[in-house]
Amino acid sequence: MARLLLTFILGIFATGELTAEDGYRLWLRYDRIEGTSNRNDYRRPMQSIIIATPSGAESAIIQSARAEIARGLDTMLGRKLTTVHVVAREADPALGAEGYALENVTVDEEKAVRIRANSDAGALYGVFDLLRRVQMREPVHELAVVAVPKIDRRLLNHWDDLNGFVERGYAGFSLWRWHELPHILSPRYTDYARALASLGLNGTVVTSVNANALILTPVYLEKVAALAEIFRAWGIRTYLTARYSAPIEIGGLDTADPLDPTVQAWWEAKIDEIHEHIPDFGGFVVKANSEGQPGPHDYGRDHAVGANLLAAPLAADGRDGIVMWRAFVYDYEDDTDRVKQAYNQFVPLDGKFADNVLVQIKNGPLDFMPREAFSPLFGATPQTKQMVELQITQEYLGASLQLAYLGTMWDEVLQQDTFARGEGSTIGRITDGSLHGHELSAICGVANTGSDRNWTGHPLAQANWYAFGRMAWDHTLGARAIAEEWARLTFDADAEATTSIVELLMGSRETVVNYSMPLGLHHIMERGHHYGPGPWVEGGRADWTSPYYHQADAQGIGADRVASGSNAIEQYAPELQAQWGSLASVPDELLLWFHHVPWDYEMKSGRILWDELALRYQQGVDEVRAMITRWDGLRDQIDRERWQATRERLVVQEQDAREWRDACLLYFQQFSQRPLPEGVEPPEHDLQHYIDVDRRYFPGHPGDY
Ligand code: GCW
């Protein structure tokens, strides 16, 4: 035993790996800067750091800022030398509520870095920015940085159940250990909050939209309060999900009708009670009358009446709580094309929502597919505040087994022009409130975090958490710049290797599109857990089947959403209808989202549709192989643990890509009756083999276990 241990220890020294690279530190690694003169570049200008806020007061957040400076600089610079001074200085309107400025100043002939902000949270974000620059070895002697978030509420949404299960979670169980709270406080809660604050995120919804009323009972509110207190010290406000039928389930009432005075009184008292536990409570996210959740429709009331019930007490007594009312609604008894339903339900309600209500809209009108046309609801209700909901967890993009950097997808979404008020009416500008002049704005991402040591399962999926946070701060930063920043912070690789990692990330989402749902195909995955191909999935409600969406038949394939079909296209601005409505001008990426196209239709490439489709699937597989080759080239640049963990996942991804290709092409071939074009590898098995694959116990699926 002793000998074994010795061999192990010697082994560690031999490889020089003293700390295991398990990914826990995320992008906040703070490794020591090599070389005294390199360290001196930072030591000199940062002998003192001045934090200047209007109050100049010490607070829990300022304590966090101090702790982070010590933790970061002391380690990176090799010794303790920075002193932090907190001073009062008048507010600067240019910095908004949570922005900051970084500048070099000289005080008593000593150099210092000054962080100016109008709030403690702003100062904390400035600290993280400064540390990021040091981590990236960027100069800090000529600082002239002003950064202001474009969106007020920048939130993660956790789809975490109270029993620890994470819906669509692929990185273990929930981070919240409800049975231990409020007495046992995992140090991980602080590290979670640090990670959020380092990105400028300022809120978290700790419970799932498929809500459990129990969270609103005193026993649980005490637990939430314990988390909220930790988060508060990092500028993070806590939010909850509200189960609409809570007045019945935990309140003993016999109705949850929003117009019933006893229901109103119940929510008022409940919201008062929440504030006793969590004075800075952020508000609620509500999934109502969607996928079986209760809601105001149960009482013949509309979404606005439903949302305003909760909004009023959240704004009472000078509170600034908000309601994020989800637009992810569709009804299987309604045979309107599912992608049209949210627009139909919400557009007539424009102007009826209270001031502190935001309608929370998924980027696409269906459900976080690898690619969708954007939700036409964006921009269609100018008097109603709208916010985008993005999905960081990879429900439809390979869970935590496949690499899909979503920064590129979110760029596509946030820069998408809706033409709601002429050119430049992007979803980014709708979400930040500037398009329609709304004061209050919010954005959220469904978290990909869990109890796995590295937080996100796939080591590279940390990039998605990072990208969401950075884009929530500023949706114009760009996916590539963010990927580069993340790669530099996360791996100590040289410039060439960093470029290679960035290239790998940048192409990865399109690769997943190619091997799973190319040319605008969507919703053809396995039932329930949603991992792997399932174009054959039928039975049960129509809008949960695959043929409802791909509509493959002997003539062709694709959802007919122009005038000959559901005419969903009429919900878009005329500019987009003109572009997307015609086969000649619709981009290949959205072809089968809007059109049912004959198998022998001649594509822009000159190939017929069937051949193009088959080659796209093949391209997806080829691209994964190229990713493996690229990763192999990084072997000596990246620590063994993270390199190996990623390598193993890429191998799974290649196999999965082949499965998608073979299963989908064999299935669609039954309709097209055409041979695979040259260049497409023959399938390994027959169709039945793929149909028979049963991954029932794949994580994240709330169904039968
Ligand atoms: O994406 C789908 C998921 C459900 C999820 C739902 C929603 C939380 O399959 O698991 O439920 O959307 O967004 O409400």
Image (tube, rainbow, N blue to C red):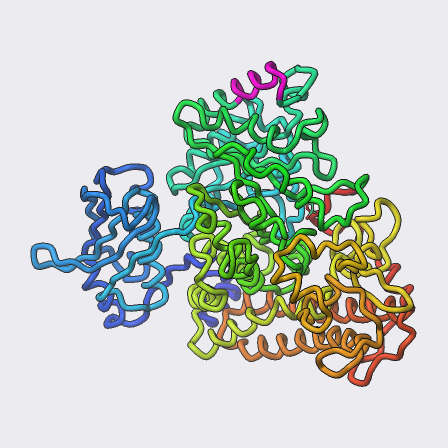
From this viewpoint, is residue 459 visible? Answer: no
For image coordinates 37% across by 60% down, the residue present is 30
Residue 262: say if magenta: yes
Rendered view: 505 above or below 120: below
**Relative to 75, 18 lies left or right:** right
Image position, residue 53 (x, y; %): 24, 43
- The quadrant of the rendering that contains the C terminus is top right
Q: Which is nearer the eye, 646 or 561? A: 561
Residue 667 falls in image quadrant:
bottom right
Residue 532: say if magenta: no
Q: Mostly what secondary structure, the magenta segment?
A: helix
For image coordinates 43% across by 68% down, the residue present is 488
**Relative to 351, 30 lies left or right:** left
Which quadrant of the frame does ligand 1 lie within?
top right
Q: Which is nearer the eye, 383 or 458? A: 383
Image position, residue 123 (x, y; %): 30, 47
Residue 631 falls in image quadrant:
bottom right
Q: Which residues are magenta?
A: 259-270
Image position, residue 132 (x, y; %): 36, 60
Rendered view: 139 above or below 392: below
